[in-house]
Amino acid sequence: MEELKDRFRAWLDGNDYKPFVIGGNNGGNLYVKVPRGDDFDYLFEDCLEADLNVDRQIKLKYCGIYHKSDHMIYDARGWFKTIDPTIEAALGISDMADDIQNRVRELIESRLQDDKRNLDVRTLSTNKLRQDLQYATQYVAPEEARKMFLFHLEPEDVHFECEYAFARWEDASLLSYLTDRDAFCQSQAEAYWAGHQEEMYLQFLINDAIRDSLAELNAQEDSPLHRIREISEAVSEVSAKSVTVTVCKNGTECTFKCTADALTRDPGKHYSTWNIFARDRAQYESLFGRYQDFTPEEITQITYNGKTIYEAEPFEQEEDEGFEQSM
């Protein structure tokens, strides 16, 4: 095996472009290398019959790129591991794309330092971008602020995140990346910086809208969203499968068993009655009607094993409380 490995490496590094054959009585494999520039060889393979002869039916299949500078095969996908387990690069083609994406994003974010004043633009020049901002301010920002509020995140936790995405490999870009990873990623970052200034500026404006929405939620002393967060945290702390819930609808109280997991998630505007245990649901529906779900502000008490884990006064509706966001 060591002899085969040494012969194969010598063939890869040599200037002889005759095919390399591996095999025996049961057939084998034929490998061909084709030069691409001074530092790369494209590798191709086909299976041979028992006599190891090539016939007119041969169909060469691409199986990797040999980089002469570091003596590694890239984009090989396991073709050569039986010959030499160490010859294939650890990074696959998708791993290298991820590496580029991560590096470029880091370069852009480092250059911006989370400050839109480091951009070269100060306006959105197209109707499309202005409409995107309007939509985000009206819908996206309140929803993102809602999620952040439920996780106790603050406006200062909102940061710019570069959205650069590596599109797809071309032969030239792959070879350029393999030749000099840092230079290739730097060129990608420069191209993104030059071509996506307004998109990045838009993200900063959306982030400002998210911070404003979150600050408004934090400024409220009590809201349905405050109660959702308190209910979720109270139920999560006891790791229960079920809890006992008391609701008050229009002055009428009802107490029932409910699955705990349903109370640990954001319910939107209401919790479904399907989470009430069947034996208690009939009583609930006799009081309030079928499909009359209950809201977080209607929950006045939650107990577990006879211990109160959540308690609230009847909710007083405020004008424009900022809760009526679609889920």
Image (spheres, rainbow, N blue to C red):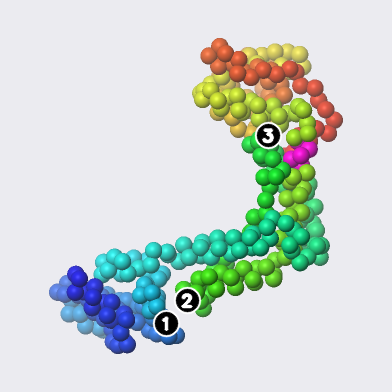
Name the side, left or right, on which 77 lies relative to 98.
left
* Distance CA(mark 2)–CA(mark 1): 8 Å
Q: In the depicted view, which residue is nearer to us: 7 or 33? A: 7
Where is the N terminus found, in terms of image quarters? Answer: bottom left
Numbered range of the magenta stretch: 213-217
Quarter of the picture containing the C terminus is: top right
The reply to whether discs 2 and 1 touch (Cβ–Cβ < 8 Å) is yes
Residue 291's place in the image compared with 307, above or below, is below
Q: Earlier in the sequence, mark 2 or mark 3?
A: 2
What is the total number of numbered labels drawn onto the structure image? 3
Q: Which secondary structure class fits the magenta region best? A: helix
**Residue drawn at 58 percent across, 24 percent down:** 235
**SS under mark 3:** loop
Res 6 visible: yes
Q: Which residue is mark 3?
A: 268
Residue lying at the far left in this picture: please name it.
25
Residue 282 appears in the picture as rendered:
no
Q: Secondary structure at mark 1?
A: loop
In depth, the one of 54 and 4 nearer the eye is 4
Question: Which residue position holds label 2?
Answer: 179
Q: CA distance from mark 1 to mark 3?
A: 59 Å
Which image quarter: residue 24?
Answer: bottom left
Amino acid type, callout 1? Asp
Q: Report the residue marked by disc 1.
A: 39
Question: Residue 67: percent from the left, percent from the top?
Answer: 40, 77
| Magenta residue check for 46 | no
